Image (cartoon, grey):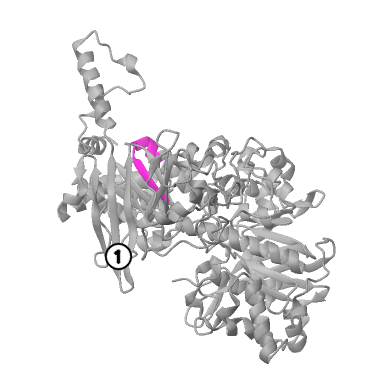
Amino acid sequence: MTATDDDRRTDHGSPAVAELPDFESPEAVSLETEEGRRLASQLVDEKTKHARKLLEVRDLSTQFYTKDGIVHAVDGVSFELDYGETLGLVGESGCGKSVTALSLTRLVPDPPGKIVSGEIIFDGVNVMKLSNEEMRLLRGKRIGFIFQDPMTSLNPTLTIGFQIAESARLHLGLSQRAADDRAAELLAKVGIPRARDRMKDYPHQFSGGMRQRVMIAIALACDPMLLLADEPTTALDVTIQAQILELIRSLSEEFGTAVILITHDLGIAAGMCHRVNVMYAGQIVETGLVDDLFDNPRMPYAWGLLDSLPRLDEQRGARLRTIEGMPPDLLHTGGECRFSPRCPYVRDVCRSAEPELSPREEELHSARCFGTEPGGWIQ
Amino acid sequence: MTQQMQPRAVERTLGENLVEAENIKVHFPITAGIFQRTVGRVRAVDDVTFEIRKGETLGLVGESGCGKSTTGRALIRLRELTEGTVRFDGVDLFSLKSDALRRMRRRMQIIFQDPYSSLNPRMTVGSIISEPIETHKLASGKAKLERVKELLSLVGLNPRYTNRYPHEFSGGQRQRIGVARALAVEPEFIVCDEPISALDVSIQAQVLNLLVELRAQFGLTYLFIAHDLSVVRHISDRVGVMYLGKLVELGPPTAIYETPAHPYTRALLSAVPIPDPKSERRRKRVILTGDVPSPANPPSGCRFHTRCWLYEKLGRPENCRTEDPELRTVQPDHRAACHYAEDAMQSDVGVAHLGAEPIKRKAFGTGAVPEPVVATSAVSSTSPRGTDAEPAG
């Protein structure tokens, strides 16, 4: 962790962060000396830089053109992400959470899919305007991926070591040898015993949990600023899931990596995320700090979803509360609240107009619901 | 035929044993070479003994490969035993032949995990559900059709859909078809093998509620197999925990979830995410290291000792490595297979803090009042029941 470490830091474009004192220890900077003042001004620079968002998504819409018509998979999604923040993207299958993640890196298969509108600003760069070559750099180097199924996302014909070293070689320009060192170091970091030896192994020689660790090592190989984790533990058992989540959490803290965690499991979102976006039928229907959202959901869908879960720490009840019906198909949308056919609180206004994502009492908390707007009928 | 569906007079009185599994073993051969020589055995279920009482729901939890599904299938003789006996209502299930076995099979059914592969795509819903009725000669002609319709409405589907095919239904609806098929022969005992894990969160609760309702209505006995501990806690009267082919703990939910006596149960519980951010921050987790060992070559002594936090904490006692602990009673109606179960019970690892001010949220759906001014006719603000009965797409 010496030469490569420094390389990676300068890759972020930040001026030699390693030399700066920690933010947590301002007493280390003395304003009496020339040197101290210089350091202090650099510190301020660092902070203003980080006052900018890592990611800004505005009005993103992605559609799929099928023989049945146009599927509005992602429909006007806007959100922001801070440096180092963990954001949850929560929803049921088909709500558009994975397509949102694919759109962020322009990986939507085209055809049949297409990003039809929207702006994606990643670390000050407009992603929509990048060339394919620049896009490739962004994907491997600045944004790391972890997918649901580690078996299909690893190449079965290449060794684990090669697959980890590959991105370090391509994106960081390391020699084969330095890249191998880095791969071994990463493999040890994600908790694989005898990392050096196991680099020669192939994916089938690893268990599901170990393969997911390898995926994490690959994702982190270039020290990305953002980690996109799409249902990273859905294919795993609960004790292995706990290991992997703990690993993602500790590594994101250690490297200051921001994480977008896509999951259908509200329990995982509760334990991992700072902020959560709840998606339904291609839209963000509620967003807020994790505590606010779980304590006081302001969109009946999020509320119903939370209430329909049996919980370990609750008294055993006879009947679970349910959301009746099924999610709508995404061929015909618009003109009404998309949750209105299933909502017990529905009123005429919900069927005649589509609510906007509008702020609620708490800071950063917004919901898409007429009933919980100020003066609404849902208390 | 409608009187067939009258609720049986079985109140949910627990007591008599309906199913008894005694020292059951199910081993699968591992073969190699062109002659398929047996080179080893996967001990999927290895010496498991338990009973299921009439009218109770026994939950069976464990990670993939622990043998819970194989156990469930062995109980209804969908798998042959390597050793041991299974008695159903006092009769040795594996001694029965042809007709006697078929008659017995009518009393036990199974609901599968995957509603996509467990229904034949070439058969209509009507023929899927009527097939077991024909096999057991319970009804024919018009009566059979009536019965199918009755079953469909019983599981919350529209009885008109007998001529539709499985692909026209969503996952939740297909699972309802699977439930209807299981109920067609009026069984007493149903093995529910991960019945809701393939479904979306908001649909899971619907199917779970259906299973609870049917249980009450027909006095059914369930073996409920799942990996989701919160779901099992919700539905079960007793819970069994399996690890690597062994039953390691068995007891009522209060015992299993509040004073677990096996270190594995505690680790499992601590790994379950709770949908409450404050609770999540407060919990004491044990992260198990490593993976589950191979059931073809299980560790000596206690099978969990290679990953056991208590074994480490107690300074690696020798008997954990050498002696296979028996499932023994640690409290009335609470059994655990651990040499140091008493120590495990003293720990506070893994237990979700009950009553430690869980989230106070108003119940979803409360306070939904009809719209004050009713301009359009019959617009109700209550939930649109029955929308689930519409086919998908």
Nearer to me, A100 or B305: A100
Q: Residue furthest bottom?
A: B141
Query: Is residue A184 something that shows in the picture?
Result: no
- Residue B60 coordinates in the image, percent (x, y): 66, 60
Q: Is residue B66 above or below residue B1?
A: above
Which quadrant is the N terminus of chain A positioned in? top left
Q: Secondary structure at mark 1?
A: strand
Q: Is residue A102 magenta?
A: no
Q: Is residue A176 left or right of residue B77?
A: left
Q: Chain of mark 1?
A: A
Residue type, label 1: Phe
Q: Is residue A324 visible?
A: yes
Q: Residue at x 65, y 86 (%)?
A: B145
Q: Is residue A240 left or right of residue A146?
A: right
Residue B90 percent location from the top left of the image: 83, 73
Most distant residue in the top direction: A32
Q: In the shown orientation, is residue A180 left or right of residue B11?
A: left
Range covered by the magenta-colored residues: A251-262
Q: Residues within 10 Å of mark 1 (few under 14, many from 20)?
A: many
Please name the residue shown 57% across and 60% down the image.
B204
Instruction: Provide the residue designation for mark 1.
Output: A64
Q: Position of residue B307 (x, y in %)?
A: 57, 48
**Which image quadrant is residue A107 in?**
bottom left
Residue A349 drawn at (x, y percent): 44, 52
